[in-house]
Image (tube, rainbow, N blue to C red):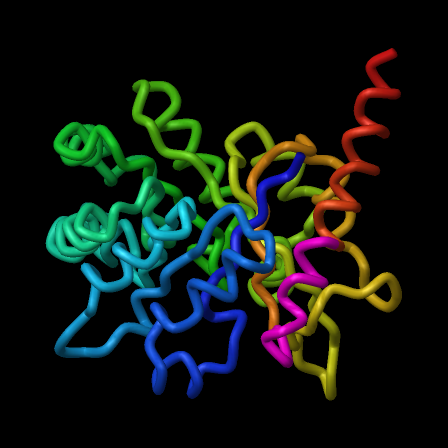
Amino acid sequence: MTNVIVPLNAFERWQVLKNGQAAFIKLIAQSGAYGIEIRRELLPEKNLQLDLIKSKIQKYGLFTVYSAPIELWREDHSLNIEDLTKVFREGDQLGAKWVKVSLGYFKKVHSDVFVLKNFLSDYPEIQLLVENDQTSYGGDVVRLKEFFESVTLYGISVKMTFDVGNWYYSYQDLEFALSELGPYVIYLHLKQVENQKGEPVTVPLQNEGNTSWKKAFFQLPSNIMKAVEFPIEPIEKTEEYIRFIKELAKESEAAQCKSLM
């Protein structure tokens, strides 16, 4: 059975900022989600309310992902220690098992992955995830592959969040990304991206239009964690989308089992 995560940025931004992320935990749990993705950019500036959020998450037994809009590597290609330390401390306070950031300005020749290895040794209970973002550098397939090859070579535990829609924003080929980065992926962000007036726009998953997200869905292992990261309106449709993902995962599992026979 596929485990489905609901990121808080799937709901209307103003509602989340007004009511706080803790207010949506009960609905997410009762919709059949396995977990929740707390978004750093949607937390209050002064009082992050991490303890409140953690207590409600624990009440419903949800798996926790903490997503922060920081870049792992600075423009000078050094590790972003200051922001990374802050985010990992917050993730630890939140009880998050996964912390997700974007790549930033990694450069194989100049970025010291051993500094990252030493940093992660202080947080053995937290898995670092790096996601392809919508920038030209953090969403570049070749650069991402170089990073994952480097950390893998030296036994550094970093895995990938594969955002199926962000490749369109960074003008990368989805199938090329799958072929190059598939082995590192443990978390799949699902969204449908359509061209509207010459610009890519994220919309809810559909069985028509641009359904290229299905290529990632069916090509990656059927049991990896999946997130419904697209506009959910009204929020009561959360359960419907989770059910849709779970049913599609059964199809994917059956197809992958058949291919092995």
Q: Is residue 82 left or right of residue 155?
A: left
Which residue sits at x=25%, y=46%?
A: 95
The stretch drawn in magenta includes residue 236: yes
Q: Is residue 73 left or right of residue 121?
A: right
The x and y percentages for residue 92 are 19, 46
- Where 150 sits versus 160, above or below? above
Q: Nearer the viewer, residue 261 or 184?
A: 261
Q: Is residue 254 left or right of residue 148?
A: right
Query: Which quarter of the figure has residue 74?
Result: bottom left
Which residue sits at x=67%, y=30%?
A: 221
Query: Which quarter of the figure has residue 30?
Result: bottom right
The stretch drawn in magenta includes residue 94: no
Q: Nearer the viewer, residue 111 or 227?
A: 227
The x and y percentages for residue 140 are 51, 51
Query: Which quarter of the figure has residue 167?
Result: bottom right
The x and y percentages for residue 65 are 38, 50
- Where 61 sits versus 112, above or below? below
Q: Quadrant where the C terminus lies?
A: top right
Q: Quadrant where the N terminus lies?
A: top right
Please, what is the dominant secondary structure of the magenta stretch? helix
Range covered by the magenta-colored residues: 232-243
Which residue sits at x=72%, y=63%?
A: 240
